[in-house]
Amino acid sequence: MNETVLVVDDEERIRSSLRGILGDEGFRVLDTGDPAGVMELIARERPALVLLDIWMPEIDGIELLRRIKAERPEVRVIMISGHGNIQNAVAATRLGAADFIEKPFSVSGLLTSIERVLERESGGVRMPGRAAIDLPAPRSAPLAGISGRKQRTLARSVVAAGQGLHSGLKTGVILHPAPAGFGIVFSSVADETAIAARLENVTDTGYNTTLTAGGRSVRTVEHLMSALHGMGISNLLIKTDDEVPALDGSAIEFCRQIAEAGVEEQQAAVEPLIVARPIAVGNNGESIRVEPAGHLVIDYILEYPQPIGRQSVHFELTSPEAYMREVAPARTFGFVHEFHKLAEMGLASGGRLDNLILIDDEKVVNTTLRFADEFARHKVLDLIGDLYLLGRPIVGHVIAHKTGHSDNLALLRAVKASL
C-alpha cells in the first residue's frame, strides 16, 4: 500500500508516533503542526487521507474540516481528539468526517479505522473490533418474500443527535456501514468497546432496553433497533455514548436518516429464525406468544387506565414503507404521576414536552396524537426493536397482551431455548 496520509496535529510526539506506525504499514506519511498551511499542502500532495486533530491553536479542527470538505470534498478525513465526546463526533461526521477516534488510541484501533475508511472507497470493508467479537452468521431483516433476500447495510454513514430520555444528557449516534455478517454492534467514541445487539447482552428491561459488554453499557436502544429491523438493516456499526437519543420519542427520524442515506444490498443471504411451533410466556394477566407464519405479523392488545383505555393493533412487516407509515411515527408515552417515581429512580431526566406523549388523569396534555391508537402502536414499535435482539429476524405471528420490554425478552429467551 502506498497511499499518502497527512497528519495534522500540533503535538510533535503524536506526529512522530503516527509517522512510525503508518510508515511501518507502507503508507507515505506527511505531517504538519501548522493548520494555516494545510490547504496548500493538500492541494500539492493530494493525500488519500487526512488525520486531523480537533483541538489546535489558531484554528480548530472542526473549522479546518469544514474548509477541507468545501474545497476538497474527495479527501477523506479522520478526526482525532484528546477530549472526544459524542457531540464533537456528531458535528464532525455531519461535516463529512469519515470517522472520529480519541487519544490515546490503540494501534489496532487506529489501523482498523484507517482500513475501513480507505477500503470503503474501493468496495471492501473491515470494521473495528471485527476479530474480537463473536459475530452471528449472516443475517438481515424479515421483510415479505424473505427467501433469497440479501443482507443490507447503509450506503453511507449518518448521524442523529438529541437528548437521552432517561439520562437527560446531550447524546447522539453515528451509524457506519458494516460488512455482511457483522450484525448490529454498538461502540464507544472513546474506546474500542463493542457491544453486539444480542439477547445475551441485555442487562435491564425496566423502563428501557439496556445492553452491556466489556464493562460498558448503552441504554434505550429499542427505538433505534426497531428502526433497523423495520428498514431491513442487517449490519451496522453504531457509535454512541451511554444512551441513544430519544429524538421525538418515536423511530421515524432514524428511518428518515436511513432512507436518505440509502440502503446497500450485500452478497450474503438472510438466515431468518422461522417459528415452527407455538411458544408462549406470561404472568399476572400479561401474555405474549409466537406462532408459525409466513412473515412477521404482530397483534398487540393494550389495556391502560383512562384516558388510554383498551387499544388493539394488527401490523404486518411486509416492507420498510409499511413500517414507516404504520409504526415508526408512534411516540413513547407516560403519565404525569409516573414521572415523580421515575425521577426518584434517576430516570426520565430527559423527558420533555417534545419527545413523548404526556398524559394526566383525563387527557393528553402536550400534543396531538398521530394515530388514535398511538399508544398501542408504540408498544408494537418497542416489540419490533426487542425482537431484533435475537441477532436474526423472526418469521412468525406474535400475539401480545399488556406486555412490555421484560415480557418481550422473556419470549426471546423461550424462543432461543427452543432452538
Image: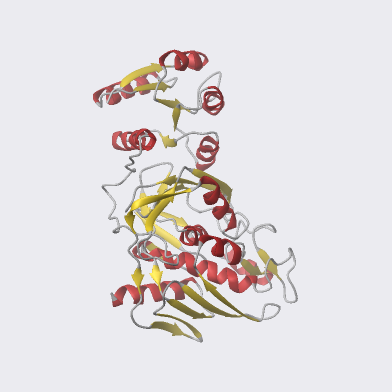
Q: Nearer the viewer, residue 156 or 97?
A: 156
**Is 287 placed above or below 374 here?**
below
Is residue 337 shown left or right of residue 220?
right
- Give x and y (percent) for residue 417: 30, 75
Count of numbered tags: 0
- Identify the residue at image location x=64%, y=69%: 334
Can residue 346 be seen at all in this image of the molecule? Answer: no
User: Where 84 sits versus 31, above or below?
Assistant: below
Q: Quadrant of residue 303?
A: bottom right
Residue at x 56%, y 27% (from the top left corner): 66
Q: How is the image coloured?
A: secondary structure
**In the rendered view, does 191 fall on the left or right side of 27?**
right
Task: Name the image quarter holding the N terminus.
Answer: top left
**Residue 215 on image: x %, y %:** 36, 53
Q: Nearer the viewer, residue 355 or 26?
A: 26
Query: Residue 126: x, y in percent?
Result: 32, 42
Q: Please tell me which residue is depicted at 45% across the width and 29% down the height of the picture.
A: 77
Q: Quadrant of residue 302?
A: bottom right
Q: Is residue 320 visible?
A: yes
Q: Is the C terminus in the top left, top right, bottom left or bottom right quadrant?
A: bottom left
